Amino acid sequence: MESSSEEIWDPFLEDIITNETVAGSNSIYPIMEPSPEEIKDPFSEDLTNEIVARLPVKSFLRCRSSCRAMRDLPHNPAFVHKHLQFSSQRNPNLILTDTICRDKGNIRNSLYFVQNEEAQDRYSCHKFNLEIAEFQEFRVMGSCNGLICLVHPTNRYAICICNPCTGEHIKIPRPVSMEDIPGNIVVGFGVIPMTNKYKVLAIIDFREPSDFILLRQTVFVYTLGDTSWRFRDNTSVLGLGQSACKAFVNGALHWVSYSRQIVSFNMDTEELDVIPRPQLELGSGSFSLRAFQGKLLILNTSFPDRIEIWIMNDYRVVESWTRIFTINEQQIGRKIRDVEIVCFLEDWEALMVYDHRALLRYNLRTASVSELSGIDGLPNRFDAVAHVGTLVSPLLGREEEM
């Protein structure tokens, strides 16, 4: 193992006892020099991999830079899958996006990784040194197993899949030509859990150029590792806006439509569907969706002073919707309209963003809130999505070609 700049205790670098050291001591028993065949690593390769697979991705990458034995592990599919399994069992971390206006009105976005340091309310923030040509500006449209989907905010048909922790990325071919006069586009990203196939979804409206009447809606699907999109027309046109999907449940992406329906896209069957929702007090407001422990959640944000949280205990069973928590403005101590619930942690805690400038941790059972202050490197203003740091590569199916 090579030395590193950090003080890492290594049992293999302890002093080695030789005949010379024995001769200088009071011992009368010389040590027999073992043959090379007798020298064995006390830890088998499988056991070593089992240990390092439990490291958070930032710790793994730091150790990998100073250890030859770990350098090839990110190219081992079995190890990457094992590391993903352990990483998914931890509380989610956050990906933050800030926006900086440069000279001459040029816009540039940056990504930050906010990681829980395995201690209550102790977080660190690290800015990614990510340079992707033509993606100085971007929006994060989804996060799945450590991969994030980036879409250019003005050239919305430019899509990139990236692992920000490893820096690997791949640009996806554009689903349409601008000559086809495409209109609104909704982009989603997810995985088929049984096969680990990752797919990008693009739902595109096509309009009549003269009066902008909607002619048709086409569903495009791209599987990482393929070279082209598959597509078919969607007979039941759905208005989904341009919001990012923040609820991946039961192998499906979920959005709220303009008509306040829950729309799902199954990554395996590639079918769009409508999921039944409970009777909600919405008025002129709406709601958003989240996921927690494999369940679909509704955040009813239509009230001026509170947020109601509903859970679907049995997927697609409308009777299983249950209201479980209500967060009141007085409990938060801040304007509820400026609070966004990003994700849920163990023991029914929630990570929140307040006014795009502060991170909050809220315990739903005790109705107590704390601000995550003192995080070095946190940008002044930001958006946030839940993220699991992994070693999964976006270059699936192409590594052999490279």
Image (cartoon, helix red, strand yellow):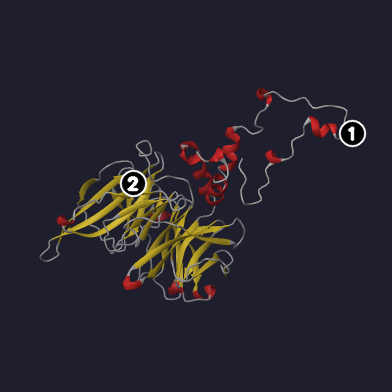
Quarter holding the N terminus is top right
Image point 53% across, 68% down: which residue?
360
Residue linked to disc 1: 26
The secondary structure type at the circle numbered 1 is loop
Residue 3 tag number: none
Q: Earlier in the sequence, mark 2 or mark 1?
A: 1
Q: Residues within 10 Å of mark 2 (few under 14, many from 20)?
A: many
Q: Is residue 394 left or right of residue 379?
A: left
Q: Nearer the viewer, residue 388 or 58?
A: 58
Q: Position of residue 257 (x, y in %)?
A: 30, 61
Image point 27% across, 59% down: which residue?
156
Residue 270 visible in the displayed image: no
Q: Is residue 142 left or right of residue 45?
A: left
Residue linked to disc 2: 199
In the rendered structure, which amino acid carries the disc numbered 2? Lys
Q: Position of residue 248 (x, y in %)?
A: 40, 52
